[in-house]
Every structure is written in structure tokens, then in C-alpha cells.
Image (cartoon, helix red, strand yellow):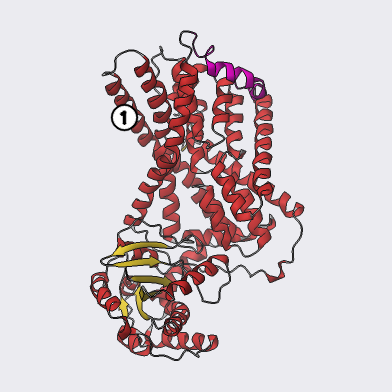
């Protein structure tokens, strides 16, 4: 199958164009370093390959090294028929620097290249115009003006693309390969000024917004408000959805068990399936809401501004402004966040960032937080009569994780061996244009987050729930206390007694060392067995009836903020750092620290 490869600088809308061509559900991001993997899909009879965004063929970061290396490999492939270089129509001169380099590279490998002027709708919105025909004649390669977001000119490009790829010899650039980097910069500037738009006109509105959002005082306050709004929304917006899912699970349980009658099968379905796996599924809406809010920040262009705001304070802790993006990504999942830290040029700052990302409260912690907050904090209580107290508590847990990460960072800053950072690049970050997020890729991303979370966690929770149910159900007649699970639990109970937790919580914690979200399913299964004769609806109500002490509950929350209970994260840390002792040492360090914090909290609050 012939290949069409898509290249372009970050923030040019290349991944959205890839989505429109292939129909695949791919992530679109507004900052470099997110798309570190090649993505492929089919467009008619062709395979389309989406390459990571890069600013130049002269690489500066590991991401760019990977992208350019793969690009050279693809150009040596006889199946590669066409290169599509995506340019940002609103910033033509900057895009052409990379575009002209790509054109030279295509000529060197005897490959065809076409240019796509994306975001043409933004240009038209300001009443401006780009001389597409003149630019095409000057470049000597086909140029298409379109908007992958507004679909302007997209149909014409899709219609022309197969013919271009079927007849690539007609579109091999007729240019000299001897052009120097200085000549590329000069040529890009000339072409941008001759055929492009007056960028200052478009930047006026952006600069007015930036004057506020990047202000030393108001920008910082706006940043804190946006972050508070993010975590308040996760709890407030998701509550009705969670109630709906919980009611649906309850109705489904009633319908299914009505056909099985009383006995071991009904007990298994109620306790292991609907009590364990069902309790976990109830919290999936929160993961989806978190993904939605972060997606809005990414696609609107605010994340790059947030990174700029955070650079100065983060540098005090031995971090970079670029650390903010992996940190925020870590609130979804630590694994891609650790990989996103590759964009940090300083090896030392990159290592500190990777080692502290696990302290960011990832989506796997959401079910645990939501469950325990619902148990400990009354739903109708507010702060200042405005903010929901459960949402404020939720924000406080995330803030605690961030503060812990900063404390650990400053310790590592002084503890790690000093390196010569003179070769580090200065902190430079392109600020993308403010844009309204496109609903289609954003909604697909939200749905995918829920599906991927269920796909990853449900099998583990199912197995754990079944094992716990089996051990807790037999031998029959003695109850949970006298079951095989009870015997095991009482052996480990002295370890968790200083935290104010009995053996059931100890078993649930141990089970969750593979994955944090297992805690909810394991506890739901055990309390389901223990309270089989009670008419209690949700798991939170069961825990409240069981009498969890306030100090023990808060200590347990803080334990889950700090503890590194994710084998997959440990594996990624091992792969990225290349050292097992760092990954497993961090696992042990955070585990001991979490235990000490939980114990101290219980002793103080009681």
C-alpha cells in the first residue's frame, strides 16, 4: 500500500487534518511533545502516516530526533509516494522555515511534496487574504488552502490527494539542494512577506488577552482560578452522571438477580460483579469530565501560557516551565506524562520531573477520592455559600499532591549530583493562537478516556473481585470474619492498625498496589459480603454505616495521594531512566512516606 506522510511544525493543525482524512480518533494537542508516536490510518487506497510536529530538521530535543529519524526512514521506503507539509496560514513565515527544509529533503530523496495552508478560516475571519497561486508558483509545489476545523477547502483537497499520490513524479520539487540554513530563513521571510498576511493584525487580539493572562498579578490569579475551577468541576459536574450510573447498575443488578433466585450465583453477582466491578464503573464519569476540562485548556491554547506563567516559580524547585505540561498531563495518567517529559532539554530537570510526576493525582485515584470524600464530607455543605465542600476537598487533595511534588523536587535539586547545564537551551515556548476547541476530536477524546480506563482497569478489578469474593465467601456459614480472607486479613491487620484501619481496608490497600482503582472494587466486594442482609444502596453508604473514623479516612486519602501504587508507572520510569533502582527505590520511598503521613494524620485527628 502506498503511503502519504504528514509533517509540519507543532500547533499547525496537522493531527486534526489527519483525523479528517482517516476518520481515526487521534489526540490533537496545542503544545510540542505530546505526539511522540507515529499514527497511521487509511485514506481511500493509501496509508496516511502522521509524524510528530517538529520545528526544524536540525533537532534539539529527543522528540524531534525520533521524528526526523523516522522521517528519513520513510523517505527511503519505495512505498512512500507523497509528503504533505502542513503550514500554519496565520504564521506563514515560521511554518515555511520547516516547509522549505522538507521540500529540500523531498528533492534529495526524489519524493513528491505538496503544501497545505491550514487554518485559512482564521485568516478569512480577519478579512485578510493569502496569495495562494503566487505562493504555489514561487515554491514550485502544489499549495492548498483549507481549514481542517471549519472544513473550508477540505473536500477539494481530499478529491485531489489520490491523483497527487498516484502521479508523484509530476510533483517532485524542481529546486537546488544546496540551499543553506541562512538562505532558508531569508527565503521564508521573503515568501511570508510577499504572499502571506500582516501577522500584526491577527496578533492584536491575542496580545490583548495575553496582556491579562500573562500579567504578573492578574495572570497568576487567573491561573489559580482556572485550576480551582478545573477540579471543582470534576466533582460538581460529574455527580449527576455518577448518580445515574449508580442507579443504572442497581437496576441492572435487580433485573439480573431476579432470574437467578437465592443462592451462591446471586451472591456472586451481587457481591463480586455489581458490588466490585459495578462500584468501580460508577466513577468513570469523573475521568471523562477531567479529560474534557484538560482538553478544553489544551485546544484553546491556554496550556502554553500556563507553562510560561509557571516557569519562574518552577525553576526555584529545580524544574522548568516545560515541567508544567507533564505535570498537568499526569492528572490524567502518569505514563504518557513521564514520556512527555522528554521535551525538557536539561537531563537533570527532566529526571526530577519524571520522578515527581507520580505525585500528581492521576485518574486512577479518582474513584478512591470520590468514594472517601462522599463518605467523609456531607454533600450539601458549601464554602462561603458558593463552592461545594466536596469539590473544595477534591481540589485540596490535588493541591496537596502538587505541593508534595514541589517539596520532593527541591530535595532532589540539592540531593542529585550537580551537572553542567551550560549546554541547556534557554526556555523558549511558542504561544499558539487562541482558538475555540473543535467539538469532534474533543468529544472523541473524552469518550476514549472512559473506554480506555474501563478497558485497562476492569479486567484487573474483575479478577481481584472474584478472588476476594471466593476467599471471603468460603467456608460458608462463618461470615466474612471467619472466612479464608478474614484469616489472611487478621494476619496483616497489625500493619494497618496504626492508621486506624481494620483488616478489610488493609486487604483492599494491598490489592490496589497493582492499580489504585482496585481499592474500590475490593472494598465493595468485601462490604457486600459482610452486609449482604442489609438494604444499603451505594458503597459510600455502606462505609458510613460501617463507621470509618474521620482521621482514618483523611489519612487514607492522603495515603493514596502519595503512594506509588501502579506497576505500569514503575515500568515506564524504569524504561525512561534506564535504572531499576530509581524506579523501585521511588516505589519504596513514596510507600513509606505515604504510610507515615496517614499514621500521623490519624494520630492527630483520631
What range of the chain is rendered magenta?
478-502
Which percent across, then down, holds residue 330?
A: 53, 49
Task: Using the image, determine if residue 109 lies above or below residue 517.
Answer: below
Which image quarter holds the C terminus? top right
Instruction: Read off the residue under disc 1.
Output: 248
Q: Identify the element where label 1 is drawn.
A: helix
Instruction: Say which quarter of the image contains residue 204.
Output: bottom left
x 38%, y 17%: residue:
267
x 64%, y 55%: residue:
578
User: For this view, does 286 lie left or right of residue 351?
Assistant: left
Which percent across, then down, holds residue 220?
A: 57, 56
x 50%, y 14%: residue:
480
Which percent across, then down, holds residue 206?
A: 45, 68
User: For this view, does 160 lie left or right of residue 212?
Assistant: left
Is 485 in the magenta?
Answer: yes
Residue 592 visible, this orientation: yes
Q: Say which of 581 and 161 sits in front.
A: 581
x 60%, y 50%: residue:
573
User: For this view, does 524 lie left or right of residue 439?
Assistant: right
Which image quarter holds the N terminus? bottom left
Main secondary structure type of the part rendered in magenta: helix
Task: Using the image, determine if residue 523 lies above or below residue 78.
Answer: above
Task: Using the image, determine if residue 569 lies above or below residue 32.
Answer: above
Q: Say which of 201 and 182 sits in front.
A: 182
Which percent across, then down, holds residue 422?
A: 71, 70
Near mark 1 (Cα within 10 A), the count class, few <14, some 14-19 or many ≥20, is: some
- Residue at the top extreme, as displayed: 477
Amino acid at each position: 500500500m502506498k503511503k502519504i506522510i504528514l509533517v509540519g511544525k507543532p500547533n499547525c493543525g496537522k493531527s486534526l487534518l489527519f483525523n479528517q482524512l482517516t476518520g481515526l480518533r487521534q489526540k490533537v494537542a496545542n503544545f510540542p511533545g505530546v505526539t511522540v508516536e507515529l499514527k497511521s490510518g487509511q485514506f481511500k487506497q493509501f496509508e496516511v502516516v502522521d509524524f510528530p510536529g517538529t520545528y526544524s530538521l536540525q533537532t534539539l530535543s529527543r522528540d524531534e530526533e525520533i521524528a526526523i529519524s523516522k522521517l528519513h526512514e520513510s523517505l527511503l521506503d519505495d512505498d512512500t509516494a507523497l509528503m504533505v507539509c502542513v503550514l500554519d496560514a496565520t504564521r506563514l513565515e515560521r511554518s515555511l522555515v520547516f516547509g522549505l527544509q522538507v521540500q529540500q529533503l523531498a528533492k534529495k530523496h526524489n519524493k513528491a511534496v505538496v503544501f497545505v495552508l491550514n487554518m485559512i478560516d482564521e485568516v478569512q475571519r480577519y478579512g485578510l487574504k493569502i496569495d495562494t497561486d503566487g505562493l504555489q508558483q514561487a515554491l514550485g509545489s502544489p499549495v492548498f488552502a483549507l481549514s481542517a476545523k471549519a472544513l473550508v477547502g477540505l473536500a477539494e483537497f481530499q478529491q485531489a490527494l489520490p491523483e497527487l499520490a498516484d502521479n508523484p513524479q509530476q510533483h517532485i520539487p524542481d529546486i537546488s539542494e544546496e540551499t543553506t540554513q541562512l538562505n532558508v530563513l531569508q527565503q521564508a521571510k521573503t515568501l511570508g512577506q510577499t504572499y502571506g498576511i500582516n501577522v500584526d493584525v491577527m496578533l492584536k487580539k491575542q496580545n490583548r488577552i495575553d496582556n491579562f493572562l500573562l500579567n504578573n498579578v492578574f495572570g497568576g490569579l487567573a491561573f489559580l482560578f482556572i485550576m480551582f475551577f478545573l477540579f471543582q468541576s470534576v466533582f460538581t459536574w460529574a455527580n449527576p452522571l455518577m448518580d445515574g450510573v449508580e442507579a443504572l447498575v442497581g437496576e441492572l443488578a435487580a433485573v439480573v438477580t431476579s432470574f437467578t433466585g437465592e443462592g451462591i450465583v446471586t451472591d456472586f453477582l451481587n457481591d463480586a460483579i455489581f458490588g466490585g466491578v459495578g462500584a468501580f464503573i460508577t466513577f468513570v464519569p469523573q475521568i471523562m469530565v477531567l479529560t474534557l476540562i484538560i482538553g478544553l485548556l489544551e485546544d484553546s491554547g491556554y496550556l502554553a501560557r500556563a507553562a510560561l506563567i509557571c516557569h519562574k516559580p518552577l525553576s526555584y524547585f529545580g524544574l522548568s516551565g516545560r515541567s508544567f505540561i507533564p505535570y498537568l498531563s499526569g492528572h490524567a495518567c502518569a505514563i504518557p506524562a513521564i514520556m512527555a517529559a522528554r521535551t525538557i532539554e536539561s537531563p537533570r530537570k527532566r529526571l526530577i520531573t519524571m520522578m515527581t510526576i507520580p505525585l500528581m493525582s492521576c485518574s486512577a485515584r479518582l474513584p478512591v477520592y470520590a468514594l472517601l470524600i462522599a463518605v467523609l464530607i456531607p454533600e450539601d455543605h458549601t464554602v462561603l455559600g458558593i463552592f461545594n465542600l466536596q469539590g473544595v476537598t477534591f481540589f485540596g487533595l490535588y493541591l496537596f499532591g502538587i505541593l508534595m511534588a514541589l517539596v520532593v523536587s527541591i530535595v532532589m535539586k540539592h540531593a542529585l549530583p550537580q551537572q553542567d547545564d551550560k549546554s541547556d537551551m534557554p526556555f523558549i515556548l511558542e504561544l499558539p493562537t487562541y482558538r475555540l476547541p473543535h467539538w469532534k476530536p474533543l468529544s472523541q477524546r473524552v469518550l476514549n478516556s472512559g473506554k480506555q480506563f474501563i478497558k485497562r482497569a476492569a479486567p484487573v478489578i474483575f479478577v481481584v473481585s472474584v478472588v476476594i469474593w471466593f476467599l471471603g465467601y468460603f467456608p460458608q456459614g462463618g461470615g466474612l470474619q471467619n472466612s479464608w480472607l478474614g484469616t489472611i486479613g487478621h494476619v496483616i491487620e497489625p500493619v494497618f492498625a496504626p492508621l486506624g484501619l481494620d483488616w478489610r481496608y488493609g486487604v483492599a490497600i494491598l490489592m490496589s498496589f497493582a492499580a489504585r482503582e482496585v481499592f474500590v472494587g475490593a472494598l465493595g466486594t468485601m462490604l457486600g459480603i459482610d452486609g449482604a442482609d442489609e438494604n444499603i444502596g451505594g458503597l459510600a453508604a455502606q462505609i458510613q454505616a460501617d463507621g470509618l473514623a474521620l482521621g482514618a479516612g483523611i489519612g487514607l486519602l492522603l495515603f493514596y495521594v502519595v503512594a506509588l501504587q501502579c506497576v505500569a508507572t514503575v515500568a515506564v520510569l524504569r524504561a525512561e531512566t534506564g535504572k531499576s533502582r530509581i524506579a523501585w527505590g521511588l516505589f519504596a520511598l513514596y510507600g513509606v512516606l505515604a504510610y507515615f503521613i496517614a499514621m500521623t494524620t490519624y494520630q492527630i485527628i483520631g
